[in-house]
Image (spheres, rainbow, N blue to C red):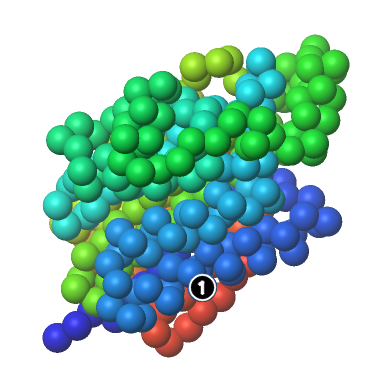
Amino acid sequence: MPTNPVLVVHGGAWAIPDEMVEAHLNGVRNATAAGWRLLERGGSALDAVEEAVVVMEDDETFDAGRGSFLNRDGKVQLDAFIMDGATLRGGGVGCVERLRNPVRAARKILSDSTHVYFVAEGAERFAEEHGIALCRNEDLIIPREIERLREYQSHMEEHRADLFAPTISHDTVGAVALDRDGKIAASTSTGGTLNKDPGRLGDSSLIGCGCYADNASAAASTTGWGEPIMKLVLAKWAADRVGSGSLPEWVAKEAMNYLKQRVNGHGGIILLDAEGRFGIAHNTPRMAWSFQTVHRKDAGIEK
Ligand code: ASP
């Protein structure tokens, strides 16, 4: 008996300003449509999360792929992870500077390598050797982000106090999916945090922190201030609770309470189990989300 597929995506959790709401909603809707086209034809959850993330990496609205935040040196450095809940295979890249779609390289690592992670030049070399064209770092940089970094660096002292306040943008993207074969998968992709130190790796590409998938528990993708999230290994924390019998909807909310109470963190999470039950939660003012099932589809920006 085939399973009814489900796809849930997010496009970052922060105080998304009113004038950016439409772009965020369009972005998560387009990503959902791309992933859903595969799932409804019987495609795999892994392919669906990859395609959904590619759409958002290509969309300059988000902090992933082209249009990402710049690091302290004015460069884009990207992290991404993808995981197959059926086999527990994962692929991740960190601190890559010449990949338009880091999730494509992460997927190649998952499929073609015995390793789980490649970082920096080694990741770019792996991607190139596996047929993925490299771009220039300048190709990933847009004027909006040059201006954002300039503004940030010229008001460093004022910003220092609230760098991690929810008003600071967290536009990381992610997706979780369940396919007709009952398999789940998850993926997360990011440009990290504004003005980050070169070489800083966030939670997004770290297994169990920003992304996790296990058919025995759940698929999860997080967004938000990465350092607190990684301290709690939050995606795995949430998946384990689903594995112990709690409903994803409830666990997603609990994960946000835990993040706030334990380490004063903020962000958002999407969580899906192999029964198709899912949860979407954030403790920031807004989070762009979207989902599709055979019966329903919806997208939103608030709880
Ligand atoms: N979690 C990401 C990081 O810390 C940032 C984000 O979600 O926007 O790299």
Q: Is mark 1 within 8 Å of ligand 1?
A: no
- Residue underneath mark 1: 33
Residue toward you, 259 or 73: 73
The residue that appears at 24% across and 77% down in the rendered structure is 180
The percent coordinates of residue 244 (x first, y second) are: 19, 54
The residue that appears at 66% across and 15% down in the rendered structure is 73
Q: Is residue 287 left or right of residue 151?
A: left
User: Taking the image as drawn, is residue 208 in sight?
Assistant: no
Q: Secondary structure at mark 1?
A: helix
The percent coordinates of residue 257 (x first, y second) are: 48, 43
- Number of numbered labels in the structure image: 1
The percent coordinates of residue 119 (x first, y second) are: 37, 25
The residue that appears at 33% across and 62% down in the rendered structure is 47
Point out the image quarter for the N terminus. Answer: bottom left
Residue toward you, 35 or 7: 35
Residue farthest along the top direction in this orientation = 157
Q: Is residue 54 left or right of residue 303?
A: left
Residue toward you, 223 or 188: 188
Q: Residues within 10 Å of mark 1 (few under 14, many from 20)?
A: many
Residue 303 in which image quadrant: bottom right
Would you place residue 201 above or below residue 116 in this image? Answer: above
Residue type marked 1: Ala
The percent coordinates of residue 212 (x first, y second) are: 30, 46
User: Taking the image as drawn, is residue 108 in sight?
Assistant: yes
Would you place residue 206 above or below residue 176 in this image? Answer: above
The residue that appears at 50% across and 19% down in the rendered structure is 200
